[in-house]
């Protein structure tokens, strides 16, 4: 109170400037304090490992003698001359191009459909989100059995429809396998694109399209002249994200083709994985992954330059009212041709009906595309084990049973006599997944909120801008590049095979995400709220806790959901950093099923997969609104 | 340009009625305002004329064409939106040219016409800017330019001035009026600002709850409001309502007297032919050209009166207020409909007022 006393004596009070000076200083101090934990964590767990793996890439190791030899850039020069790398590069480019184009087109269609008002739109939005909310490893499990040759569901369906001639081992042919792999990736990723495009569409003022309609523009013209330019900034972001996600695609690959048949689907990420973790050539593997990292950085910059915001011209100078029209008039109105109502190919009523039918047709296709594979998975999990290995394959179950679920949820009961070892691990792995996800969500949201607040209130400070872009860059670092240094680091610390190791790793790459999300959310909270709280006697911390956090609750919920889902679904780190059921999460257990696939475990595998996608699916249905919110703030889970 | 006739138009969203049996005829070259509180359906009606919303019942005709379900793009109607709806990625030049480019018009003609519109609105130096680089008033002019450039059958404006600051609003108001006269435009102007409507319009359509309350010339709406709603919506400060018996004579409680504050002045001695009320001065509010006096009547109700010179008036003093009888509207208390005035207006109106002012 004493500080305000001098100010009340009059406007000429001397201490006023000093007071102001001190206040700004304190604001900045608080901001640095708020953002410090996030930056520190990111630096420690992204920066250091990145540096370390770069150092690795300059060495060569002998897997037998475990000797490290410094070779400088030799790993890189050797890579440049290896046909393996060039071929992998070509496949990566093809895979990425297929994915980016596919997700953008498909996501665009989804977004346009979901932007219309129709009965059931909310449900369809949730259904469309499901393929993306699922763990990529679950996606892999699902499609590997849809594509499977003898017993696969697609072939089964073809048999049922009397089209047996078309049935084929889908992943048997190299080039077809690459295409199908990319298609599955698109299936998984298109909803993300759709979400982001939808957010863009919803932010478009309704008056723009109305104005264009009145100006005489038809639907196609409006899409090209109004919608597309409006979405351009979104498209940039989407392209970056889609490209990076395509470059880093690993889980689906692991579950579906493992680089095969032959090496037809060995993309860069897989090559790096093979070198590092199959052949234990850490140096060469790190070099491959560094090439991948460099490519994703370069592409991000390229997109930014090509599609980025055009630099705005000078803002309107004051006093341009001088330009108000005067009496002088040189030109006269041009002689316009008389207005002729347009004559369409179809009578208006027919055209309207056709448009409706077309719209519902597309909507039905969107529904089938998103829902059928999941329904198929659900059906397979409810089939008796014998149904899954019938020849000729058929899609229709002979009967429905909960046997598979009992086998994985209550492995000790009598009903599950012949469960496999893997099935017995399912309940504990679900618990692991849950604990890790919950802790990661809490930690990332707590630190991310602090950092997000500081970023949003200091958007113009140069240090904060730099830090923010630094955070975004960490999003573009392939997880594969980080996993090796993590493995080594955690082994030194004795944390291998603990949940703590997973929690630390997940927090490291989810913190930037949650800071970024919370920043966008706080930007929508008016600054006057901060000021009111401070004037009413709150400290900075209390203001954040008592006033801003309650206001920002939807953002907090969205962020927490994203973080939980991302860690629930994560596969690569869990695979590398755990080796026993003690800390293994559900994706690793699913992968274990796949590795030792035996016919009698198919049923439990599908049941476990269904359990693994249950939380994400529930989230998609219950918190669809928050997911859209998350996408709006530019948040992106891989 | 064309006339617009709205015949028996109703519209409802599901079961919620928004427009109810509207009958409005707008002549070719006329300036008509739709005036009403927010939610009264004025913008909805505008969008119905434009074809952006469908009407449930009735017919809208543009000149000799019945619109039916004609899509907006085939109506040849221009609309200036409240938020201007400038295409954010197009330069001013392209924004203005856009409607012309949708028709097969020679590039040369398009250029000439854009130049004409730019000159008309003083936009010549701004043609290569993006909307984001314009001030509010400039955006507004670009929106008008885009609307008139193709010589539409009618120009609709949806609260086009509401996003401008006060002084600019008055200037743009004058501009719009000038443009309308010069080009002979048929304009339908939606606003909730009664002053805007009074100044601009040839006729005003007052709407409330989707029902047309009155459709008449501005001064008629002001002097002879069709009902209590119009009477209280138009005019600021609001019209005073007094119980019927106060007029003496045959009026009883089933009538209400409507007196505009500007007609009610303090007098020393009430001359003949006026309605006089007595009360205690509660509050003096100087407003520049006039001063408002809040006067408490015997029954405790407050009325607002005006005087030119506030000097000498002190709160607490007893005052006699007078209003010429022909300026007193009579409303049916139950239905709110105006049934007439206390006296027929005579040519001596101004003399009355003068006499009253002298009596002060």
Image: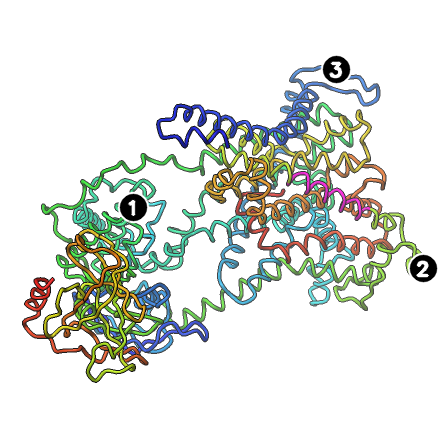
For the point 45% across and 66% down, the residue is A355
Residue identifier under label 2: A414
Q: Is residue A341 visible from the viewing direction of this image?
A: no
Image coordinates for residue B339, horizontal then vertical, percent? 22, 80
Is residue A624 or residue B89 the one in the foreground? Answer: A624
Q: Is residue A143 visible from the viewing direction of this image?
A: yes
Per the rendered image, the range of residues in magenta is A429-445
Chain letter of the residue beneath label 3 in the structure image: A
Q: Is residue A439 magenta?
A: yes
Residue identifier under label 1: B136
Callouts 1 and 3 on one subunit: no
Give the mark nearest the N terminus, 2 or 3. Answer: 3
Q: Secondary structure at mark 2?
A: helix
Residue identifier under label 3: A69
Q: Nearer the viewer, mark 1 or mark 3?
A: 1
Image coordinates for residue A280, horizontal then vertical, percent? 78, 27
Callouts 2 and 3 on one subunit: yes
């Amino acid at each position: 109170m004493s500080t305000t006393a001098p100010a009340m004596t009059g406007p000429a009070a001397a201490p006023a400037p000093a007071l102001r000076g001190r206040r700004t200083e304190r604001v900045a101090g608080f901001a640095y304090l708020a953002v410090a934990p996030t930056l520190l964590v990111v630096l420690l767990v992204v920066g250091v490992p990145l540096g370390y793996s770069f150092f690795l890439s300059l060495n060569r190791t002998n897997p037998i003698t475990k000797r490290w030899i410094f070779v400088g850039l030799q790993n890189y020069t050797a890579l440049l001359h290896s046909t393996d790398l060039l071929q992998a590069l070509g496949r990566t480019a093809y895979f990425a191009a297929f994915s980016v184009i596919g997700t953008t087109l498909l996501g665009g269609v989804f977004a346009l459909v979901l932007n219309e008002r129709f009965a059931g739109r909310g449900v369809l939005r949730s259904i469309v989100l499901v393929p993306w909310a699922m763990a990529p490893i679950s996606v892999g499990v699902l499609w590997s059995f849809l594509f499977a040759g003898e017993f696969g569901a697609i072939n089964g369906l073809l048999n049922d429809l009397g089209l047996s001639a078309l049935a084929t081992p889908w992943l048997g042919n190299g080039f077809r396998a690459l295409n199908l792999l990319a298609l599955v990736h698109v299936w998984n990723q298109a909803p993300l694109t759709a979400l982001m495009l939808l957010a863009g569409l919803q932010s478009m003022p309704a008056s723009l399209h109305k104005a264009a309609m009145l100006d005489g523009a038809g639907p196609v013209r409006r899409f090209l002249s109004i919608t597309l330019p409006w979405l351009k900034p979104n498209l940039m972001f989407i392209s970056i994200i889609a490209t990076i996600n395509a470059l880093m695609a690993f889980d689906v690959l692991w579950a579906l083709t493992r680089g095969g048949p032959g090496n037809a689907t060995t993309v860069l990420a897989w090559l790096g994985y093979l070198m590092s973790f199959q052949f234990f050539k850490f140096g060469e593997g790190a070099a491959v992954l560094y090439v991948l990292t460099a490519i994703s950085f370069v592409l991000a910059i390229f997109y930014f330059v090509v599609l980025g915001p055009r630099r705005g011209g000078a803002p309107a100078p004051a006093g341009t009212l001088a330009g108000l029209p005067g009496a002088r008039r040189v030109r006269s109105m041009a002689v316009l041709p008389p207005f002729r109502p347009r004559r369409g190919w179809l009578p208006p009523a027919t055209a309207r009906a056709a448009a409706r039918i077309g719209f519902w047709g597309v909507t039905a296709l969107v529904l089938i595309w998103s829902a059928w594979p999941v329904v198929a998975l659900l059906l397979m999990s409810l089939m008796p084990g014998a149904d899954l290995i019938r020849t000729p394959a058929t899609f229709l179950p002979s009967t429905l049973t909960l046997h598979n679920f009992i086998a994985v949820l209550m492995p000790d009961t009598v009903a599950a006599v012949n469960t496999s070892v893997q099935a017995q691990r399912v309940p504990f792995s679900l618990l692991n997944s849950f604990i890790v996800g919950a802790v990661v969500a809490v930690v990332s949201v707590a630190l991310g909120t602090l950092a997000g607040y500081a970023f949003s209130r200091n958007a113009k400070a140069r240090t904060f801008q730099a830090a923010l872009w630094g955070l975004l860059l960490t999003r573009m670092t392939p997880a594969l590049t980080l996993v090796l240094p993590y493995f080594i680091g955690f082994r030194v610390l004795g944390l291998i095979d603990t949940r703590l190791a997973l929690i630390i790793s997940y927090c490291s790459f989810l913190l930037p995400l949650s800071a970024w999300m919370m920043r966008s959310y706080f930007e929508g909270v008016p600054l006057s709220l901060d000021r009111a709280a401070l004037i009413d006697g709150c400290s900075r911390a209390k203001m954040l806790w008592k006033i801003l956090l309650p206001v920002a609750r939807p953002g907090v919920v969205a962020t927490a959901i994203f973080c939980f889902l991302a860690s629930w679904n994560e596969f690569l780190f869990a695979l590398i950093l755990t080796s026993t059921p003690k800390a293994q999460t559900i994706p690793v257990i699913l992968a274990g099923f796949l590795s030792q696939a035996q016919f009698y475990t198919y049923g439990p595998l599908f049941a476990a997969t269904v359990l693994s996608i249950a939380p994400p699916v529930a989230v998609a249905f219950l918190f669809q609104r928050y997911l859209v919110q998350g996408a709006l703030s530019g948040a992106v889970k891989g | 340009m064309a006339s617009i006739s709205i015949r028996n138009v109703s519209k409802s969203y599901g079961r919620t009625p928004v427009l109810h049996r509207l009958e409005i005829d707008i002549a070719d070259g006329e300036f008509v305002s739709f005036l009403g509180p927010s939610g009264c359906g004025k913008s909805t009606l505008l969008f119905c004329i434009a074809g952006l919303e469908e009407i449930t019942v009735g017919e809208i005709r543009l000149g000799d064409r019945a619109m039916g379900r004609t899509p907006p793009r085939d109506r040849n109607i221009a609309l200036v939106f409240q938020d201007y709806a400038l295409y954010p990625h197009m330069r001013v030049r392209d924004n203005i040219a856009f409607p012309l480019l949708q028709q097969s018009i020679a590039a040369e003609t398009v250029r000439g016409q854009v130049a004409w519109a730019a000159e008309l609105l003083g936009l010549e130096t701004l043609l290569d800017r993006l909307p984001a680089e314009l001030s509010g008033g400039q955006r507004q002019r670009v929106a008008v330019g885009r609307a008139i450039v193709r010589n539409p059958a009618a120009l609709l404006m949806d609260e086009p001035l509401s996003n401008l600051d006060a002084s600019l609003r008055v200037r743009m108001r004058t501009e719009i009026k000038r443009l309308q006269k010069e080009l002979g435009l048929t304009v339908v102007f939606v606003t909730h600002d009664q002053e805007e409507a009074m100044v601009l319009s040839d006729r005003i359509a007052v709407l409330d709850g989707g029902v047309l309350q009155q459709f008449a010339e501005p001064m008629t709406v002001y002097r002879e409001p069709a009902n209590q709603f119009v009477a209280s919506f138009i005019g600021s400060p609001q019209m005073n309502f007094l119980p019927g018996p106060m007029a003496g004579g045959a009026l009883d409680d089933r009538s209400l007297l409507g007196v505009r504050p500007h007609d009610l002045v303090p007098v020393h001695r009430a001359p003949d032919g006026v309605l006089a009320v007595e009360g205690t001065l509660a509050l003096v509010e100087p407003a520049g050209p006039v001063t408002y006096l809040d006067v408490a009547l015997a029954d405790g109700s407050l009325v607002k009166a005006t005087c030119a010179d506030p000097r000498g008036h002190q709160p607490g003093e007893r005052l006699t207020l007078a209003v010429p009888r022909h300026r007193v509207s009579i409303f049916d208390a139950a239905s709110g409909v105006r049934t007439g005035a206390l006296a027929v207006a005579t040519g001596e109106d101004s003399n009355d007022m003068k006499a009253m002012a002298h009596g002060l």
